Amino acid sequence: MENVTLPPDYKPNKKEKYMNDMQLTYFRQKLLEWKKELLAQSKDTLDDLRQGGLNQPDDIDRASLEVDKSLDLRTKDRARKLIIKIDQALERIEDGSYGYCEETGEEIGIDRLMARPIATLCVEAQERHERMEKTYDDQA
């Protein structure tokens, strides 16, 4: 992929050739920005967790603080998993498979990638997965 400079107001559209250099550059920048934001949030969460101990004299205050820290840790874990998916999407951009369904090889589509740039499945394959998960969950 060539080194492309995007116009400031560029947005991928369906009229362009799918996954051209401008679209790939756009999605790479979008993913890198998202990753940067998640890393900054994660750092803030870590800083918050390091401050303030659980040695609150009041049981209610201590319980409230423990709930807050638990939520912070879950948020941090979610961010960690998202960062892994972002890194995988960046790898797909580099190897030329970004934007194509892992199951069918079909185009995932610009609209879907704009909404979820880490998507790996086209809408039909995603719906199939969700139906299978629901069927499996209903049987459990």
Image (cartoon, rainbow, N blue to C red):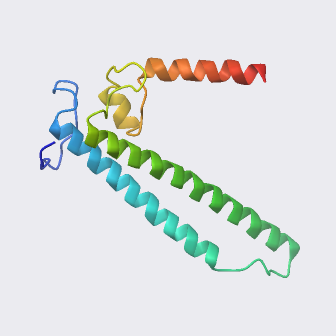
Dividing the picture into quarters, in which one does residue 139 lie?
Answer: top right
Seen from the viewer's position, the closer of residues 91 and 12 is 91
Identify the residue at horizontal 64%, vertical 55% (top origin). 74
10 sits to left or right of 57:
left
Identify the residue at horizontal 46%, vertical 49% (top origin). 84
Residue 97: where, in percent of width, then height? 30, 32
**Number of numbered markers:** 0
107 sits to left or right of 58:
left
56 sits to left or right of 74:
right
Identify the residue at horizontal 33%, vertical 53% (top origin). 32
Dividing the picture into quarters, in which one does residue 40 lie?
Answer: bottom left
Seen from the viewer's position, the closer of residues 40 and 2 is 2
Q: Residue furthest right?
A: 59
The quarter of the image holding the C terminus is top right
The quarter of the image holding the N terminus is top left
Residue 89: where, in percent of width, then height? 37, 42
**In the image, is residue 128 above or below residue 8?**
above
**In the image, is residue 71 above or below residue 47?**
above
Seen from the viewer's position, the closer of residues 34 and 97 is 97
Residue 25: where, in percent of width, then height? 21, 45
Identify the residue at horizontal 63%, vertical 62% (top origin). 72
Residue 94: where, in percent of width, then height? 26, 43
